[in-house]
């Protein structure tokens, strides 16, 4: 096995490097450098940027979560005077405060975050799948419909949210006019906590459907038509065809988009924050917006915000690990 | 008898009239819901500045006064230029970087390969709320606060992991034989990537570009915290129209329409590729 010392970048494309007796550390570093430098050079920009701008701040955030840093005791410059940091290490105190429920906010926020995530993902997925199936048929004006349906994705989210805010305005908003004309009672949409919750879920679905629809439409188009023909030959009803051909055929796309949109929804900051602004009782805050408010309103509590952030991250990592493990046996 | 052809005589892919009506009906309703909020903003923006309070009056007072105010008497053009610089640079940089990383992951096996894929996924999960304070301190140390470069790099960290993940999936669908052929003709791996694979991956790249552009064009939180008024982008700047003291919804609607136009143009350019580009990436998790 001498190829490892040859300066042949193409070797990097070969399958896994074969096992060989362990050489000295320096030699093995040099060898793997010779073999892999090409691949490493191509990923270097991403790795460097992520390391500096994501992982370093993350580590710093993790450190802050173990201290009692807040606005009054971090280092700052007032004019020419530099005041050093006076916060100190408190160990896992912050985590204990949060997880034992002693700060009084974590579990209510977590509960609403879960409701919000599950509701948004489930409804968005169902509507997205429905629309994708309609668009996957031969239908006149298909391009036109597709362009219309993708619209909420094409305009920047903050504009979509702003449009809804204007429409949901209790006094002048057109949304109440529309639903009263259908016979439903008018609501103060951005007023009470419950209606605010319904409003944010509604807007998030409006924003999220196009992504689902486009991804699932691609998934539908990649299912070979012969499968449907064969199922039809065997006398499968449309319902059976849906459950036995469409659903399994969509599985790879489904698993990816559900994972991604769960993560995105769980961390969805812009929609809740922009739709409701400061006009909330705090009941509509999900974990992320709650953490943001900790960090930027009143006396900024950096350590608590960081603690929440780390907890959110741990929840998501645990979820996605579990999710992927669940899927693996079936995907193989 | 002919109007209601019995089911068994209907050819493949044909529909009864009722089914056809239901299909079009559903699609029309869905399209209206999707488009209405956007059109509503456009409609309000054409009225006088108090139009949002009296939508019925708009038709009688159509005019461009909101646009005139926004374009001539506000900082909007400045914000627009800032956004264009930031979003344009993010797109170019994001696509280049994520394409090369995606290609390396798709074609080469190297130590750290799996870790990197996992990292890209995990990066999506980082709540902005933890990152924003340390990131601010870090950028301040690097003298990048309130600079275009700082914001561009931050946006790349949001866009690149997702784009690289998707492009890796797209590159996986391009046959490896093409790489082999390039190699035989004496191209370096990078040459193969640049001359052969990139042109073939146009749909995937288009989606990536679209995603990066929209990320940068519409991001609010970082832009609002990191940039001063001179460098503020549209998303951050537009909020000053609707401050607590003076809610100028008329200007806000006009500005929104103007902001949506470039985003929609980019979108129209790539929408042809959107379906193919996105799925190929999605299927290969």
Image (cartoon, grey):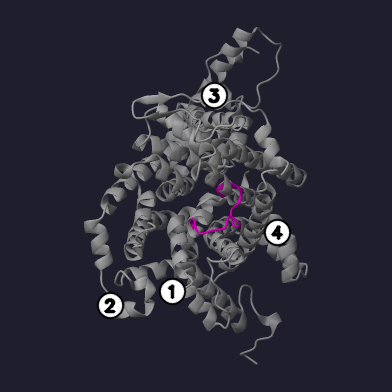
In the rendered image, residue B60, in percent from the top left (x then y), is placed at: 29, 81
Secondary structure, mark 1, is: loop
* Alpha carbons under labels 4 and 2: distance apart: 52 Å
Determine the residue positioned at 51% across, 41% down.
A299
The residue furthest bottom is B1
Name the residue tied to disc 2.
Answer: B61
Nearer the viewer's eye, disc 4 or disc 1?
1
The disc, 4 or 1, on the residue closer to the chain's N-terminal end is 1
Name the residue tied to disc 3.
Answer: A10
In the rendered image, residue A147, in percent from the top left (x then y), is placed at: 46, 64
* Alpha carbons under labels 3 and 2: distance apart: 69 Å
In the rendered image, residue B151, in percent from the top left (x then y), is placed at: 40, 38
Is the same chain shared between marks 2 and 1? Answer: no
Determine the residue positioned at 73% across, 69% down.
A239
Part of the protein shown in magenta: A277-289
Is the same chain shared between marks 1 and 3? Answer: yes
Quadrant of the image occupied by residue B91: top left
Report crowding for label 1: few under 14, some 14 to 19, many 20 or more residues within 10 A (C-alpha).
some
User: Height in image: A287 above or below A246?
Assistant: above
Q: Is residue B256 left or right of residue A124?
A: left
Name the residue tied to disc 4.
Answer: A247
Chain letter for mark 4: A
Secondary structure, mark 4, is: helix
Q: Do the residues bearing badges 3 and 4 touch, measured as CB atoms within 8 Å? A: no
* Alpha carbons under labels 3 and 4: distance apart: 40 Å
The one of A297 and B92 positioned closer to us in this rendering: A297
* Alpha carbons under labels 2 and 1: distance apart: 18 Å
The disc, 3 or 4, on the residue closer to the chain's N-terminal end is 3
Is the same chain shared between marks 3 and 2? Answer: no
Is the same chain shared between marks 4 and 2? Answer: no
Nearer the viewer's eye, disc 1 or disc 3?
1
Circle number at residue A172: 1
């Amino acid at each position: 096995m001498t190829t490892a010392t040859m300066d042949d970048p193409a070797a990097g494309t070969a399958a896994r490097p074969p096992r060989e007796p362990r050489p000295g550390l320096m030699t093995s570093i040099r060898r793997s450098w010779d073999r892999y430098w090409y691949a490493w050079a191509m990923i270097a920009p991403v790795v460097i940027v992520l390391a500096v701008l994501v992982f370093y701040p993350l580590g710093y955030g993790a450190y802050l979560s173990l201290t009692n840093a807040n606005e009054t005791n971090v280092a700052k410059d007032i004019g020419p005077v530099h005041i050093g940091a006076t916060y100190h290490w408190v160990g896992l105190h912050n985590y204990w405060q949060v997880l034992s429920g002693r700060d009084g906010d974590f579990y209510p926020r977590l509960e609403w975050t879960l409701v919000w995530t599950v509701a948004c993902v489930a409804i968005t997925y169902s509507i997205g799948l429905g629309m994708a199936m309609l668009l996957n048929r031969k239908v006149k004006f298909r391009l036109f419909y597709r362009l219309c349906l993708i619209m909420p994705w094409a305009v920047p989210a903050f504009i979509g949210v702003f449009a809804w805010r204007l429409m949901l305005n209790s006094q002048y908003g057109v949304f109440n006019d529309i639903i009263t004309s259908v016979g439903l009672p008018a609501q103060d949409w951005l007023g009470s906590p419950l209606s605010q919750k319904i409003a944010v879920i509604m807007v998030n679905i409006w924003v999220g459907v196009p992504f689902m629809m486009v991804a699932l439409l691609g998934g539908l188009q990649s299912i070979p038509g012969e499968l449907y023909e064969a199922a039809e030959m065997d006398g499968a009803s449309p319902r059976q065809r849906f459950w036995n051909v469409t659903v399994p055929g969509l599985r790879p796309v489904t698993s990816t988009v559900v994972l991604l949109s769960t993560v995105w929804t769980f961390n969805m900051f812009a929609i809740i924050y922009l739709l409701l602004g400061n006009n909330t009782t705090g009941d509509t805050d999900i974990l992320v917006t709650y953490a943001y408010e900790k960090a930027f309103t009143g006396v900024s509590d950096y350590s608590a915000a960081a603690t929440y952030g780390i907890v959110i991250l741990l929840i998501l990592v645990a979820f996605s690990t579990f999710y992927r493990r669940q899927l693996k046996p079936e995907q193989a | 008898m002919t109007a209601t052809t019995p089911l068994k005589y209907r050819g493949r892919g044909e529909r009864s009239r009722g089914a056809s009506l239901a299909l079009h009906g559903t699609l029309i309703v869905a399209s209206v819901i999707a488009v209405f909020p956007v059109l509503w903003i456009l409609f309000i923006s054409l009225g006088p500045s108090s139009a949002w309070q009296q939508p019925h009056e708009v038709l009688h007072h159509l005019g461009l006064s909101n646009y005139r105010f926004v374009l001539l008497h506000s900082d909007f053009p400045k914000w627009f230029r800032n956004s264009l610089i930031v979003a344009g640079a993010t797109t170019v940089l994001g696509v280049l970087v994520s394409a090369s990383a995606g290609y390396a992951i798709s074609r080469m096996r190297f130590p750290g390969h799996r870790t990197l894929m996992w990292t890209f996924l995990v990066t999506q999960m980082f709540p902005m709320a933890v990152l924003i304070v340390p990131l601010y301190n870090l950028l301040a140390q690097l003298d990048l606060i309130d600079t275009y470069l700082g914001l561009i790099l931050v946006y790349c960290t949001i866009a690149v992991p997702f784009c690289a993940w998707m492009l890796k999936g797209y590159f996986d669908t391009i046959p490896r034989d093409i790489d082999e052929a390039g190699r035989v003709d004496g191209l370096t791996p990078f040459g193969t990537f640049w001359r052969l694979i990139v042109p073939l991956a146009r749909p995937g790249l288009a989606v990536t570009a679209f995603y990066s552009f929209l990320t940068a064009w519409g991001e609010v939180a970082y832009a609002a915290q990191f940039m001063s008024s001179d460098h503020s982008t549209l998303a951050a700047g537009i909020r000053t129209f609707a401050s607590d003291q003076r809610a100028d919804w008329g200007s806000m609607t006009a500005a929104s329409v103007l902001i949506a136009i470039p985003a929609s143009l980019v979108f129209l350019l790539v929408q042809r590729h959107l379906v193919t580009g996105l799925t190929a990436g999605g299927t290969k998790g």
